Image (cartoon, rainbow, N blue to C red):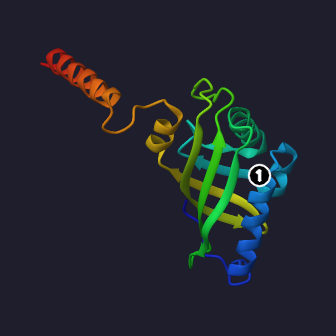
Amino acid sequence: MAQQTPTPSDQPTHERAREIFQRAYDLLNEHDLAHVPTIFTEDILFEDDAAPEPIRGHEEMRRFLSSIWTAFPDLRFERLHGPYLAQDGGVAVHVRVTGTMEGKLDPPGFLPTGAHLSTEYGGFYELEGDRIRRARIIINMSDAAVQLGALPAPGSKGERVAVLAQGLQARLKRRRAG
């Protein structure tokens, strides 16, 4: 996320960045799509490991949040550390997200499992005034998938079966290529 170096008056103070992100997470925890323009600029570019492609603009952000809130009706965001301010005006925040998968998660189409999710992510942001203009969310999708039952747990019988299947698939690919 390249950006121009902000002037000192454009760069938020630590206290102001903390207020902006606390308000953003409080509003997101209300699960109200009407808050999207309050949190994000109209030209928001939101890149999240949980999304199949970058999210652009308010309408796509509403669809993304609606999908997540449908799958996790009790979803909660909790700021753990930060915000940390970069010299170029960027802001980083360490967040925990929790919720119970009671609905379909689409995309990718996972059906509800009733499983509880508790995972952390790093968010890297650019602000415009009091709103988020750019975001890059880095989350351990393997950890989340194991918690939701989409992947077998490390060391489990399911993982051993998956490794065997991958080995067979690799052999077939090598035979086809050779």
- Tell me what residue is drawn at x 25 percent, y 20 percent: 169
> In the displayed structure, does residue 83 sit left or right of residue 25?
left
Q: Is residue 1 above or below residue 147?
A: below
Image coords of residue 63 (percent x, y):
74, 35
Residue 41 spot, x, y in % from top left: 77, 55
Looking at the rendered image, the quarter that the N terminus falls into is bottom right
Q: Which residue is labeled 1 in the image?
A: 28
**Helix, strand, or loop for circle 1?**
helix
Quarter of the figure with the C terminus? top left
| Residue 3 drawn above or below residue 136 | below
- Does residue 90 appear anywhere in the picture? no
Tell whether 162 sits left or right of 26.
Answer: left
Q: Quadrant of residue 9?
A: bottom right
**Residue at 72% of width from left, 77% of height from top?**
10
- Nearer the observer, 69 or 49: 69
Residue 105 in view, yes or no:
yes
- Along the viewing direction, whichever of 100 and 128 lies nearer the viewer: 100
- Residue lying at 65% horizontally and 50% vertically, measured from the top left: 45
Rendered image quadrant of residue 18: bottom right
Relative to the observer, which residue lies in front, 127 or 143? 143
Q: Amino acid at mark 1?
A: Leu
